[in-house]
Amino acid sequence: MAKLQPVRGTHDLIGHEARAHIALTEAARAVADRYGYSPIATPIFEFTDVFQRTLGDTSDIVKKEMYTFEDKGGDSLTLRPEGTAGVARAFISGGLRNELPLKCFYAGPMFRYERPQKGRLRQFHQIGAELIGVPEPTGDVEIIALGADILDALGILTETTLELNTLGDLPSRLAYRGALVDYFTGHADALSEESRERLTRNPLRILDSKDPGDRAVINDAPVFDDYLSGDARAFFKSVRAGLDTLGIAYELNPRLVRGLDYYSHTAFEFTTEALGAQGTVLAGGRYDGLIETMGGPATPGVGWAAGIERLAMMLRDPDVAVRPVVLVGMGDDGEREAMHLARELRCAGLTIDLQYKGGLKRGLRRANRINAAAAVLIGADELLRGAVTVRDLDSGEQVDVVITDLTDHLAAYR
Ligand code: ATP
Ligand code: MG
C-alpha cells in the first residue's frame, strides 16, 4: 500500500474550509434560482469521446490534462475535466430539445492532470451555468449578469474585472484564421514548439499561449476586430449595449480566447489581481457549435464556470457556521438528560453540540474551542428541581432555567 498521503493535487475539505465551500455554493445557487436556472448534476465520468469530441484534439485539456482509464468492461472513460460537455451530452441523450431554453446551474468536482500550484489542483470544484437554446445576445448578457451577481453576492465583484471579447461567427473566424496563419508562419522561428504545432491545427489558440516568447510575437498579431463579419459585429455590439444597460462594466480584451475549441461570439472572463498568476475566477462564452459537433440538433448555448477554490481564496470571512449551544451533562443522570435534551432542542431547530463525556471543565474547554454561544450545564442537583444552568459564553452571565422553559430561553441563540 502506498504511504497514506492524499494524491498530489488533491485536497481534503475539512472544518470551516468545507463549510465555506458549501456556503459559497449555496449562495451561488440561490442567485441562480432567482434567475430561473435549475440544478443539474451529470455524472463525474463520461465516455472519453464526450470530452474528446467537444474539447477538440488540440486543447490542453484533451492533449495532456485528462484522467482517462479503461473500465473493467473495456470502455474508455474520463473523469470530467469541465461541466459543459456533460450538460450537452445530457441534453442530447435525454432528448431535452423540447425543453428549450434549458437553463441550468451545476456545482461539483472536476479533474485535470495539471502541475499543482496555488489555485491549481488536480481535483478542484466548479460552479457553472449554461443557457441552451437562446441564440440572441440577450442570452449572453443574462449569463454574464448571473456571473456578476453571484460574485456580488459573495462580496468580491469589486475585486474583479470583466474582460470581454468576441470570437465572431464562422466566416469571421475563417478569415481571421487565415490572417493569423500568414502572420505566425512569418514568425514561426520565434514561436514555442507547442504554438508551431497549433499553427496548422488551431492557430487561434496560439493567442492563449502563456509562453513569454510567444507573447512577444502575439503582441503584434492581427486583431480579430479587423476580420469580423457584419453579423458578428452587430451581435457583439448588442451584447455590449446590454451590459451597458445593466451597468455591468467591462474591458475589451482582443487577446482573450477561451482554451476550448467550441466557442463562438462572446468570450469573457472575470479576472482578479488578488490571486497572483491564477487570476481567472470565472470564465465562459458562447458555444453555438458544440451540440451539433456532438451529434445533436444544431442548438446554440452560452455559459460559464468558476473555480470554487479560487473564489474561496478571495472571501474575507469564510466562517459562516452557526454558533452552537453546548450541552454538558454531569454524572450519569446529567449525561442521560443531556442526550435527551440535545435531541429535543435539535428537533426544535437549535444547533446543539453534545458533550458526550468528561464533565464541566472539559465541556467548557470544548465550548470555547468550537466557538459556542452558550453552555447548558446539567447537574444532578439542579435536575432534582427540574432545572439546568445556562451560561452565556460571551458575557459569562449564568442563569437557572426550568427545563420546560429551556427551548424558549435558548431561542436567542438560534
Ligand atoms: P487556466 O487558464 O487558469 O488554466 P482554464 O482556461 O483552464 O484556466 P476553464 O477551463 O475556463 O479554465 O475553467 C474555469 C475556471 O475553473 C477557471 O477560471 C478557474 O477558476 C477554475 N479552474 C480551472 N482549472 C483549475 C484547476 N486546475 N484548479 C483549480 N481551479 C481551476
Ligand atoms: Mg487550464
Image (cartoon, grey):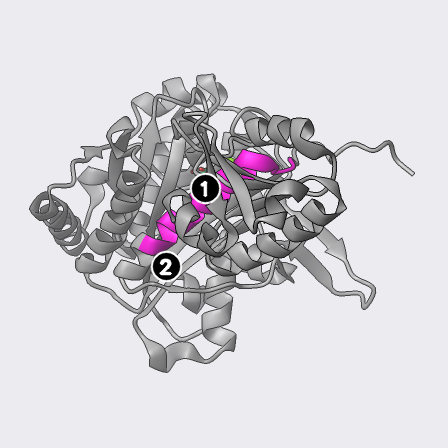
User: Residue 322's mark?
Assistant: 1
- The local secondary structure at tag 2 comes to strand
Q: How many marks?
A: 2
Asked if marks 2 and 1 touch (Cβ < 8 Å), the reply is: no
Q: Which SS type dominates the magenta stretch?
A: helix
Residue at 54% over, 64% down: 42
User: Residue 130's mark?
Assistant: 2
Residue density around tag 2, few if under 14, some if 14–19, many if 20 or more, within 10 Å: many
Q: Residue most toward the right?
A: 1
Residue 393, position as x, y percentages in the image: 47, 29
Residue 63, position as x, y percentages in the image: 61, 43
Q: Which residues are magenta?
A: 11-30
Nearest to the eye among marks 2 and 1: give it: 1
Q: Disc 2 residue type?
A: Glu
Q: Is residue 394 visible?
A: yes
Residue 367, position as x, y percentages in the image: 57, 31
- The local secondary structure at tag 1 comes to loop
Q: Residue most toward the front?
A: 385
Q: Disc 1 residue type?
A: Val
Residue at 69% over, 59% down: 77
